[in-house]
Image (cartoon, rainbow, N blue to C red):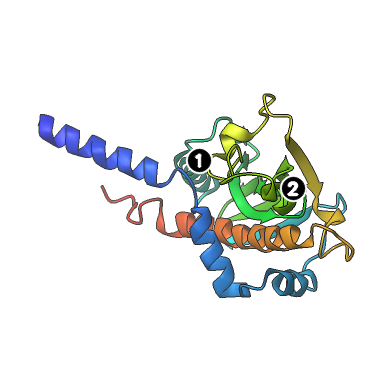
Amino acid sequence: MKKLFVFISLVLFSFFTLNAQVIKVDDLEKYAKQRYGDKWLDAAANLASELTLDQNKSLTYQEIIQCPGMSKNQIYVLMNYWVTATFAGQQSAITMNDKESGTIIFNATIDNIAQHTGTLSEYSVSITPVIKIDIKDQRLRVTYTVQNYDVLDNVGAGWIGALGRDDNVGRNTYGDPKRMKKDATDRNLRDEHWEIAKHYPFKAKDNKKRTSSKALVMTHAYSNVIMDKIEDAVKRGIVGNENDDW
């Protein structure tokens, strides 16, 4: 019995660990390239013809998912389970959870969706979409919103600055963004918020267009992944075999 308990514990631990994020950034990039091509400027321009910003100048996607035969309560419980399991590693991922109204709001951060070394600075872009799930009997509505790119600007780490360094000694890398964020010990590190509406392709003249192009494509790709994962969870269950016959 003890061995069985240990085995089950390991399976559950592995499940929650594997689902600690929806998708790894490397896999998201492969997915984005397969769907939109690997020329980020062209891909961003093509997407811009299909996308519109909302009244708050945010990039917002919305999808209604049908859930035949499922009550509001069943969907609510399943979505709570999915959000908790998927974003277990993020503190305060759920910002609103109202069973009576059938509303769940949570954050879904993904780091380093775009990196670029410019003339003077080195940029690393992350996003934290706000995702709202509204639930009714037999259906739910997902709203995915991003207003800003969260950018770590490493001032002086651009290609000109690199010429004055030997073997990049002292240069910050993208490998550990959490360590670098809000690092007051390094005056060259700046946390910035770039409004999507003020950058390419929504603004034609943008001296950071190479960075913002990839950021837009990756943000769009991430919305697809989130929507697909939610639909898959509500239709197939978290592990793919939940049912009431047990």
* Left or right of residue 145, residue 67 in this image: left
Q: Is the residue 22 above or below the residue 41 in the image? A: above
Q: Is the residue 8 above or below the residue 58 in the image? A: above
* Coordinates of residue 149 in the picture (x, y in percent): 73, 48
Q: Nearer the viewer, residue 78 or 209?
A: 209
Q: Nearer the viewer, residue 68 or 240?
A: 240
Q: Is the residue 170 above or below the residue 231 in the image? A: above
* Left or right of residue 87, residue 194 in this image: right
Q: According to the image, label 2 marks what residue?
A: 121
Cα–Cα span, label 1 and label 2: 32 Å
Mark 1 residue type: Phe
Q: Nearer the viewer, residue 192 or 54?
A: 192
Q: Residue at x 58, y 67 (%)?
A: 32
Q: Are marks 1 and 2 in contact (CB under 8 Å)?
A: no
Q: Is the residue 204 above or below the residue 196 in the image? A: below
* Coordinates of residue 64 in the picture (x, y in percent): 64, 60
Q: Residue at x 32, y 55 (%)?
A: 241
* Coordinates of residue 6 in the picture (x, y in percent): 18, 33
Mark 2 residue type: Ser
Residue 11 shows in the view: yes
Q: Secondary structure at mark 1?
A: loop
Q: Residue at x 51, y 50 (%)?
A: 71
Q: Secondary structure at mark 2?
A: strand
Q: Nearer the viewer, mark 1 or mark 2?
A: 2
> Which mark identifies residue 87?
1
* Left or right of residue 39, residue 57 in this image: right
Q: Quadrant of residue 92?
A: top right
The 10 Å Cα crowd at callout 1, few under 14, some 14 to 19, many 20 or more, is many
